[in-house]
Image (cartoon, coloured by chain):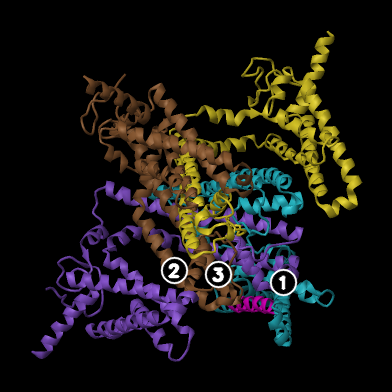
Chain colours: A purple, B brown, C yellow, D cyan
Amino acid sequence: MEIENKHTWKSKLHEVIYEADTPNGKWFDILLLAFIIISIILVMLESVVSIDREYHQILYIGEWIVTILFSIEYVLRVISVRKPLKYIFSFFGIIDLLSTIPMYLTFLFGGAQALVTLRALRLLRVFRILKLARYLGASKQLKDSIIGSRVKILVFLFAVMVSSVVFGTIMYLVEGEANGFTNIPKSVYWCIVTLTTVGFGDIAPQTPLGQFITTIIMILGYGIIAVPTGIVSAEYAKNSLNKEENKGNKLIQPEDLIEVHTNSQCCINCLAEKHQDGAEYCHKCGCKLHHE
Amino acid sequence: MEIENKHTWKSKLHEVIYEADTPNGKWFDILLLAFIIISIILVMLESVVSIDREYHQILYIGEWIVTILFSIEYVLRVISVRKPLKYIFSFFGIIDLLSTIPMYLTFLFGGAQALVTLRALRLLRVFRILKLARYLGASKQLKDSIIGSRVKILVFLFAVMVSSVVFGTIMYLVEGEANGFTNIPKSVYWCIVTLTTVGFGDIAPQTPLGQFITTIIMILGYGIIAVPTGIVSAEYAKNSLNKEENKGNKLIQPEDLIEVHTNSQCCINCLAEKHQDGAEYCHKCGCKLHHE
Amino acid sequence: MEIENKHTWKSKLHEVIYEADTPNGKWFDILLLAFIIISIILVMLESVVSIDREYHQILYIGEWIVTILFSIEYVLRVISVRKPLKYIFSFFGIIDLLSTIPMYLTFLFGGAQALVTLRALRLLRVFRILKLARYLGASKQLKDSIIGSRVKILVFLFAVMVSSVVFGTIMYLVEGEANGFTNIPKSVYWCIVTLTTVGFGDIAPQTPLGQFITTIIMILGYGIIAVPTGIVSAEYAKNSLNKEENKGNKLIQPEDLIEVHTNSQCCINCLAEKHQDGAEYCHKCGCKLHHE
Amino acid sequence: MEIENKHTWKSKLHEVIYEADTPNGKWFDILLLAFIIISIILVMLESVVSIDREYHQILYIGEWIVTILFSIEYVLRVISVRKPLKYIFSFFGIIDLLSTIPMYLTFLFGGAQALVTLRALRLLRVFRILKLARYLGASKQLKDSIIGSRVKILVFLFAVMVSSVVFGTIMYLVEGEANGFTNIPKSVYWCIVTLTTVGFGDIAPQTPLGQFITTIIMILGYGIIAVPTGIVSAEYAKNSLNKEENKGNKLIQPEDLIEVHTNSQCCINCLAEKHQDGAEYCHKCGCKLHHE
């Protein structure tokens, strides 16, 4: 019976930490988000020399408090899951680990502290907490558009790369080291800066011929900016249209059903998410879901 | 009877100040616009040192004349409305107040004078005066597109923010203080400058590794510029299409009717606008509308 | 009979100068284009100090030859038209005059010479000569899209202007003269540079608060770049679709007919263009068209 | 019989070098790609002074090994084709030659070495090797959109050119040599930098009037960025729609059939590609295709 008890204790913890449907779960997640944001602000302030000089002690202590809390959270997450390895090697598992380690590394190295801002990636949890899941469902269409035009975008990027190398080399030959094009990699870098219309201006062509070639690069860049936009727009419009048509036909799509009834429950066994409301068993591993 | 008289006097004033259908009302609004533009130009010229040195006296007097006229206008606006508080706390009420206060504050502080350019916001009145209301109706479709893609744009902005913090920190570590990335907030700022393809160039990566990461950021920025464009385009195209279809079905839409017959009358009681032509009573509060 | 003769001589000249369907007319126009391009290159080279120092004499003589040829052409154009005033005050009439005057003005002033590059506008004639008229017909759809979304673009530009003035003033107050924001007009100029993602970098925010506000301006600019694109795209797509549908219905559109049969003839009386092939009389004034 | 034998030897070589369907052919192509990338990296590293100083000997030898291998490959390509001239003057034939010559030229001139990065263009072969042919088929739609809007894009570019010359001249007159606008060609170059929103900032307007005109140029540039995007988007959307409709009609399109069954075989006689799977004879010249 003790095992059963322990199991219940574990599954309650699991519910608080991994889910956001119960009041406790929600509070935990909001608290977590607040600590993530505080910790990012702390690291940012610490990097500002003038602030760090005055408030070093406070920032340092605050940082350690957050780190210890995150470490405890990480341990609890590992404990409360039935298959800890699955969590440890999941996307968020790795991010969670990476966001606590850097502070411990500061005992060994100095600069590692800044890596703590990798915690920013933890903010992606916000989507689950704020019940944004259904909004993501709305942006699913956008994702589909990007995936649908994946190959075209890759072909496009490849073409950009090849032309950057070719134009970069030409500019290196034309402008030379005297005008800031000190080597080919730097020239290629400059070429991408120009093609994307960023134009820092730290390096700029000085010779008339160089400026003429730059004109060609810029108009090329200006022209091809239309390409990815056109691709995604068209793909997106097509998806929108298809969806509209389906609605018109009054055919209930499977994804529409799931979209409506999904909750933030998370299987204690395999960490699968997006269970239907009222589901008793995990749709991935068949393990019984915990209900209070 | 005196009260009745006073009421008539008030309602006439209301008509001149708040409406633009009668000749007097139109003249008042055009004059007002002219004074707003003059006042903005005055403040702008005053900020140019060389001009201010020579014409300081003229600019100063001109500024005070405009301020006093605006103050009188503000008082008249408050007096001529039945529910003054409603006006005072409306968008234009606050803007109107904010555009007169700064000059009075200059008795106390020096720099406050520049705040006078907040008067620029008063220029938004131009839409009513130039009968642009119906054009705004045309741009309603655009507003709908933006609102319709609100959540997707927020998700997109959130993703931009998180990736800026992550890339900004990486660049701070890679480039360091020697190359202008003096602290993480500045690094994040630089990252957004690059992602949005603005590229001031006051800070620019110097190390080969930093330039390589910059290349990734730029291509990312170049790629995602397609996303909001694609979203709004598609949403807009969809709205256009729907409207076209409705027209095809010859179904008269309620908003079409209103669009045609709206005038610039403004209820003296509740400040409601967009009354139908020939309407005798306010469609919000039932108060009788004034007609000459 | 002499008048008749003179008329014939005039109408032949008219055909050569104004039209591009006969071999002579075509040769005249190609020669004209060549001279326009040569003249622009001459002025450009003249402005380059190192080139001008060496070849000043040649450039100067070349420039005068071109100017005299253009003057003769202008006089011939005026003579060969029945209603000279109509030509003189037409778009190309004014451009033709403006492109010859500056050289004569150099007897009086020095810098006026550079105005000669206004001749670039004469290059727009290329469309007629290279039979691009029908392509312009193709781009008519684009023009329709821009005209169709005219009001929306104006509303958009007005909003950009107002927000530039407001943000420019705020940046002037925040950054101050020490950081390059020397006065409000310059601040507003910087704000537009940033909003349009040009980002010269000659002026850049230095204070943390200024950089934070800049971030907002940039993301705003990045977001609203979607708006005009979305508007024109959607309008264009709609026009395309309508055209397609019409084609589907096999209804012959009047403009389709004209598009196919139009030639470059130009009425000697009223300068009307786009006559149908085989037309005997001008479709604007009824005057007989000249045929060899 | 010896001729027959030699023919077989040749055709086997042809298969290995030109095709990618047999294991040998595939291995050859992957090896080739690797050598191309290695050679580009070698040239890039060589241009970095600090690296070149230390590893000059290794880089130099590596470069010569790659060049000799490419030379052998080029000779083999010429030998194994029946009509060598057709290969020599094809796009890839010229690129292949140009990517070996520069190294030999270094015996005569110094800088020619950098031209070796023209080898980057050889990377375009990657599409055939990685069986990307079918993806290109997918991007065929994109190509159609660009071709379909070719004329409109040219008209657009021509308009950009004319306005750049006109605005460039005006800026030259307004700003003058003192502010960096040293001559008209440079002014025109600056104008294109601004119109395309690249904005290097090496030249920037200093006078109030110049900044005012710059504002107009930028807003113009910002507005017209919508034009090519809109054109390509709309064209692309139309093509997508047409394709969709055709699919709906269940009409099998000829290109769909070809797309599915095409392989990477290459006719030994005329170098024609895109043969159907199982084809026995070249669809261009009727020559028998080689099968193992």
Tell me which chain the residue with mark 2 is part of.
Answer: B
Say above or below: A123 vs D190. below
| Inter-mark Cα distance, 3 to 2 | 13 Å
The picture places residue D237, in percent across and down from the top left corner, at 46, 49
**Do circles 3 and 2 both sit on a common chain?**
yes
Say above or below: D100 vs D239. below
**Do circles 3 and 1 both sit on a common chain?**
no
Q: Amino acid at mark 3?
A: Thr
Assign a secondary structure to mark 2: helix
**Residue at position x 42%, y 36% in the image:** B70
Q: Which image quadrant for residue B122?
A: top left
The C terminus of chain C: image quadrant: top right
Q: Nearer the viewer, residue A101 or C173?
A: C173
Assign a secondary structure to mark 3: helix
Assign a secondary structure to mark 1: loop
Are the two marked residues, 3 and 1, in contact with CB atoms closer than 8 angstroms? no
